[in-house]
Image: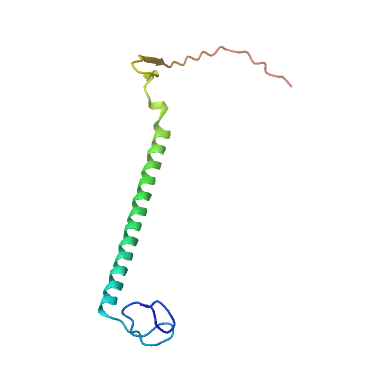
Amino acid sequence: MKCMVCGFDNEAREAYCRACGSPVKVSLDQVESDLISKADRQMEQTAEEEIRRWLVVAICLFLVAVTAKVLYGPSTWPVHYTVPSSGDGAPYAMVEESLTLTLEPMEVPIPKD
């Protein structure tokens, strides 16, 4: 409730202005509207807190999924898998990955001091 003397915005339950100390005259309608607006503000604040909480949970789950994919990703994927070709009705292309490594013996001279 706005003070008629100084214009300070007091709550409806205040009998005297918190800024200047003059008596605040309020009606039942003013008290009701002030309580309703206060309840609305509390509901908005609670909803914002809940949204923030769920957002943090979603970000944490995303980070766990990305970490698991990085740790257990390509090395655990199958060697043979299909990749769809572009275009409607295009056949699938087979991709095969093979790694063959042959090591040849090599002579290394040992220096003598």
- Residue 82 falls in image quadrant: top left
- Residue 98 falls in image quadrant: top left
Check the image and tell me how it is coloured.
rainbow
- Residue 88 falls in image quadrant: top left
Location of residue 102 in the rendering, given as x and y in whole percent from the top left corner:
51, 13
Task: Say which residue appears at 39% left-offset and 32% top-offset.
Answer: 72
Of residues 46 and 107, the one drawn nearer to the viewer in this rendering: 46
Task: Say which residue appears at 64% left-offset and 16% top-offset.
Answer: 108
Task: Say which residue appears at 29% left-offset and 76% top-offset.
Answer: 30
Of residues 61 and 2, the one drawn nearer to the viewer in this rendering: 2
Of the 4 image quadrants, the one containing the C terminus is top right
Query: Total of numbered circles in the picture?
Result: 0
Task: Say which residue appears at 29% left-offset and 67% top-offset.
Answer: 39
Name, please, the residue furthest toward the bottom.
22
Of residues 25 and 13, the one drawn nearer to the viewer in this rendering: 25
Location of residue 95 in the rendering, given as x and y in whole percent from the top left corner:
40, 16
Of the 4 image quadrants, the one containing the N terminus is bottom left
Looking at the image, is 33 positioned above or below residue 66? below
**Left or right of 104, for residue 27:** left
Location of residue 53 in the rendering, given as x and y in whole percent from the top left corner:
35, 53
Location of residue 33 in the rendering, given as x and y in whole percent from the top left corner:
28, 72
Looking at the image, is 27 positioned above or below residue 65? below
